[in-house]
Amino acid sequence: MAELSRRIAQARGDIPADTVLRGGQVFDLMTGEMLAGDVAICGDTIVGICADYDAVQVIDVSGLTLVPGFIDTHLHIESSLVTPFEFDRCVAPRGVTTAICDPHEIANVVGAEGIRYFQAASERTVMDIRVQLSSCVPSTHMETAGAELLADDLAALMGHPSAIGLAEFMNYPGVIHREPEAMKKLALFEGGHIDGHCPLLTGRDLNAYIAAGIRTEHEATSAAEALEKLRKGMRVLIREGSVSKDLHALQPLLTERSAPYMCLCTDDRNPLDIAEHGHLDYMIRTLIALGTPPLAAYRAASLSAAEAFGLKDRGMIAPGKRADIVVIDSLEGCHAQMVLCAGRVVNDTAFAAREIIAPVGRNSVRAPEVVPSEFRARANRTDTDVIGIRPGQILTDHLHEDIPIRDGDKFPDPARDLARIAVIERHGKNGNIATGFVRGFGLQAGAIASTVCHDHHNIACVGVDYADMAVAANRLSALEGGFVVVRDGVVLAELSLPVAGLMSLEPFEVVRDALSGLRAAARDLGVTLEEPFLQLAFLALPVIPALKITDRGMVDVTRFEILS
């Protein structure tokens, strides 16, 4: 009652506001107008606009534009390769005041303990981290993960203040074919928010998937796919990550008419890409440069996102809304000059005041030591299934190549851009090693390897030299996980990710610089991909068409089965 009374009194001007932003113009996402006047804040809430206010603290924002804080509607913080606390420090100054995350990467390694870590971290970060409950751990039955979460496990995690609902339901065949455990999870969250994940799903199968109560979808990679999903009532999240780059394909659909039903997300974006290009600020700049009306771009980045996920307390600079505000140079530039999260200025002082909790998932890499001969591709026919990379997408092509057999093996062929790919089980469960072929890296020598390997996070390794592949894979065990580049038996570059084999304990600036060195080392091997490590990670995700590989073998995702 006292706090409510104080807000109303400050809104009327009966008593001074706690904070006033003065001299800027507010971009109103309801009408598209630029509004003059002070923005008054009481505690964590905006209480007044379009008027003059007295305040305890006045912040001069003359000549600048104020927009609502940006909301990343779907991401995996683990894929930023830093802890939630470093992610907070990395992206909040760029205007991201809310991040809706799915911690299924760490959950696939250590289970519910990983989700509880993210929930606890969300109570302490400057930005508002919303922790969805991971629906598919593991993503399918065709991989070996470190943990499994059933409906009963998710029920025990419900009720935390950071919760919105059930995270992306990747096992779309399990939904449309009514697999019993999938049905239990859907029933548990019925009537609440359920995120979608159904790449290339169409027609009656898409109808069935949506009929399960799934409301959002971030896997559309073409305008036609996104349009069908919009027509059928799904909110489409435009994604632009380090690997999955769908913004240019979907930008023509984002208009002032469609903006209430479209949002922005990054899914997987690392600190080097954030440093070089940006985060949601980069998406907004790019959309406007491509011709999207500024009102549509900023609605998708905040108001539409808040509405889509039931966050009624944010998304506008208006009385009664959470004081998440980005002060930018211009609508077209979208360069944050100041950011407020829940009324607090985002700066070093705010970050220093946080309580940092210890991470979980140490010593999680329990892979067998491998020798070069284990990367041989034993076969009795020359016709070979090959994963074809599509740069800028996580969709792959299912290629067929004729590869000769010599001494009982099919060897990598750099001249044809045919590299060996292998996945090694690293959770200490069975020691599986599966091998196959991939085209698209451009490798001419050596090997690269990673424990960031969606979503089971086993060791993924690609190379044209078996000895280098063995050195790379074994080095990852010594590092407690991470990224490695090897040539002629020598480690050229590496990054240790000891938190579940996914996240660094270092500041994001250190990770950013290490990634730059890793990319340079990979280019020296002939790699042509802009982001080879996350591209490699997605080659092991058996819910994204068309051909993938797990520790159990090559997976035909279209048929949802392991190839013999």
Image: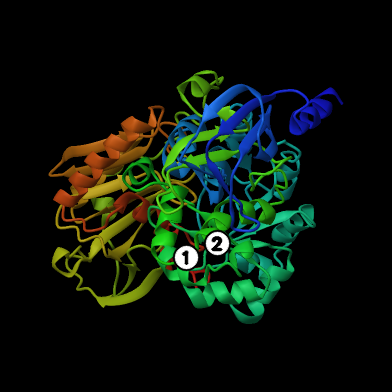
Residue type at tag 1: Thr
Residue marked by disc 1: 292
On-image quarter of the C terminus: bottom left
Compare residues 193 and 166 and report the one nearer the observer.
193
Q: Quadrant of residue 127?
A: top right
Q: For the view shown, which residue lies furthest in the front direction?
A: 52
- Mark 2–mark 1 Cα distance, whole angstroms, equals 7 Å
Query: Is disc 2 placed on a helix, strand or loop?
Result: helix
Q: Residue 479: image x %, image y %?
A: 33, 31
Disc 1 crowd rating (10 Å Cα; few below 14, some 14-19, many 20+) is many
Q: Which class describes the residues within 10 Å of circle 2: few (<14), some (14-19), or many (20+)?
A: many
Query: Which residue ends up furthest to the bottom in the rendered image?
Result: 203
Identify the residue at image location x=59%, y=64%.
259
Marks 2 & 1, CB-CB < 8 Å contact: yes
* Horizontal side of residue 480 vs 349, given as left or right: left
Say which residue appears at 20% left-offset and 63% top-offset: 412
Q: Is residue 475 left or right of residue 82?
A: left
Give the x, y percent position of residue 60: 51, 30
